[in-house]
């Protein structure tokens, strides 16, 4: 994997994302699961409606089902949701009807009850109902046999409602991806270690649990391989375990050019790896590779160790790659939402890298979407990240921004929220 696409030594975020997506083949294994477990999974086989929706003409209102246009009507019965009227209306006849109840045979319109006056069994109204008024037609939503969701769609709450309404109780989805997670660095201590036991310069391994929290939102099976020292033989053991048990491995730390970064040596032994310098801030170093095995291969994503960089590169690059791996279709339409917002503070920026500053965006009292950056914009500053709800995306070639400028904002969405 050469760095041939790199521009001025740095590869753009867009090019890196596209290269990842283009070089990954989706897994094809599927499983059939109950609809109740399907939210967030990727549809792998067509789902067809078992019936028309609505299944019959029914009322959109509480009121009266009417036959023809008359000055008054004679009430001859009622049609309630779950209890249809079994007779047939003749001209000038009406039934009481509730929302969702079947429109009786012969009725051609429904008058809402607010417009009606009842005198014994005689119904009159303040204005006539027009033909078809307040009738929800059979099949106007879905036809029997219709394909309900495109293949490769990520199943969301509205899909669940649609599938259930159409009589679908189970779906075939792409099987869950298996992730292996590990951290690399002599200075890392597992969370839970008493602070008093940390040596000079030691820090908690915060990346692994944050990455795990993110991947869990993507419905993956996660193998947590823990943290590993900067020692080639140990790192090799970790990578072999990851390769043998997972579809992909995500590491953090050990991908920069520092002396203790053995990742490269070990990976070159085990497979094919490219070390990229990305035009992204925070998060310049990034590694992507493949570890071949008896059956297929395991993908390797090496994230920078700095905590903000690790999460930003996960979000901007690895998540789209994983979506491709699990068969999500139309990836270009799945890119995170971007909106314009007015900047509430000045920003310093040097041209050369796309900057994902951490900010907080909201609508002000005048209804204008505004954004202010949060905290020092360092790749190790987690407090500002934690106080943010969006990235302020500053284009690669742009420079400083001033208060009042309109900037691009990317609100945090899953798996960041
Ligand atoms: P590296 O990529 O190994 O050069 O690490 C860059 C910075 O990220 C260093 O300050 C590391 O201490 C820090 N770092 C590396 N791994 C982690 C981790 N798992 N959790 C928190 N910080 C880390
Ligand atoms: Mg390190």
Image (cartoon, rainbow, N blue to C red):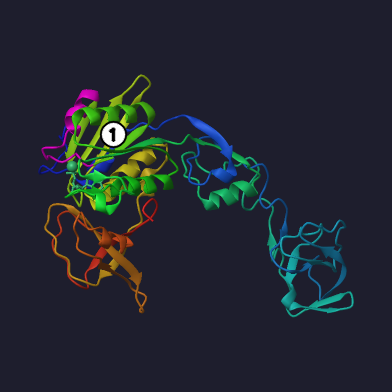
Taking the image as shown, residue 279 lies to the left or right of residue 226, namely: left
**Front position in the image: 225 or 343:** 225
Q: Is residue 370 visible?
A: yes
In the drawing, does residue 92 fall left or right of residue 45?
Answer: right
The kind of secondary structure element at disc 1 is strand
Which sits in the foreground, 74 or 150?
Answer: 150
Residue at point 60%, 39% (across, down): 170
What is the quadrant of the N terminus in the image?
A: top left
256, above or below 292, in the image = below
Q: Is residue 99 above or below residue 118?
A: above
The residue tagged 1 is 300
Q: Say which quarter of the image contains residue 240.
A: top left
Q: Tell me the quarter of the picture where residue 331 sits.
A: top left
View extreme (front): residue: 196
What residue is at 55 percent from the left and 43 percent from the top? 37
Q: Residues within 10 Å of mark 1 (few under 14, many from 20)?
A: many
Foreground of the two, 327 or 148: 327
Is residue 241 one of those drawn in magenta? no
Magenta span of residues: 253-270
Based on the displayed image, in which of its 4 quarters is residue 234 positioned? Answer: top left
Quadrant into which the C terminus falls: bottom left
Q: Where does residue 189 sit, x and y in percent of width and height?
A: 26, 45
Q: Looking at the image, is 359 positioned above or below residue 43?
A: below
The number of discs equals 1
Residue 364, given in percent of the width and then of the height, sits at 34, 75
> Residue at horizontal 29%, vertical 49%?
206
């Amino acid at each position: 994997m050469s760095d041939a696409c790199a521009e001025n030594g740095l590869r753009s975020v867009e090019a890196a994302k596209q290269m990842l997506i283009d070089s990954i083949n989706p897994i094809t294994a599927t499983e059939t699961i109950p609809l109740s477990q399907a939210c967030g999974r990727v549809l792998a086989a067509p789902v067809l409606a078992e019936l028309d929706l609505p299944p019959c003409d029914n009322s959109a209102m509480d009121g009266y089902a009417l036959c023809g246009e008359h000055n008054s009507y004679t009430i001859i019965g009622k049609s309630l949701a779950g209890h249809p009227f079994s007779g047939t209306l003749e001209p000038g006849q009406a039934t009481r009807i509730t929302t969702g109840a079947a429109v009786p045979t012969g009725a051609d319109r429904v008058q809402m009850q607010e417009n009606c006056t009842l005198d014994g069994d005689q119904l009159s109204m303040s204005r006539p109902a027009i033909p078809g008024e307040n009738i929800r037609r059979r099949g106007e939503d879905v036809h029997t046999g219709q394909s309900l969701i495109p293949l490769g769609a990520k199943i969301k709450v509205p899909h669940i409602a649609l599938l259930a309404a159409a009589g679908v109780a189970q779906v075939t989805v792409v099987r869950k991806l298996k992730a292996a997670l590990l951290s690399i660095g002599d200075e890392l201590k597992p969370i839970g270690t008493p602070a008093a036991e940390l040596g000079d310069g030691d820090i908690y391994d915060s990346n692994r649990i944050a990455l795990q929290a993110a991947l869990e939102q993507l419905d993956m099976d996660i193998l947590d391989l823990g943290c590993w020292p900067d020692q080639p033989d140990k790192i090799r053991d970790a990578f072999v375990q990851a390769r043998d048990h997972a579809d992909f491995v995500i590491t953090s730390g050990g991908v920069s050019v520092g002396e203790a970064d053995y990742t490269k040596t070990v990976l070159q032994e085990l497979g094919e790896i490219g070390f990229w310098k990305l035009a992204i801030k925070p998060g310049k170093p990034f590694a992507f590779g493949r570890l071949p095995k008896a059956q297929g291969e395991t993908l390797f994503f090496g994230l920078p160790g700095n905590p903000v960089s690790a999460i930003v590169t996960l979000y901007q690059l690895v998540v789209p790659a994983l979506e491709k791996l699990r068969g999500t279709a139309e990836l270009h339409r799945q890119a995170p939402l971007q909106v314009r917002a007015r900047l509430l503070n000045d920003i310093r920026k040097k041209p050369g890298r796309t900057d994902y500053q951490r900010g907080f965006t909201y609508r002000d009292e005048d209804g204008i979407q505004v954004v202010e950056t949060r905290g020092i914009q360092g790749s190790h500053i987690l407090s500002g990240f934690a106080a943010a709800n969006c990235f302020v995306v500053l284009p690669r070639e742009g420079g400083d921004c001033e208060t009042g400028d309109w900037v691009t904002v990317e609100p945090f969405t899953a798996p960041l929220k």
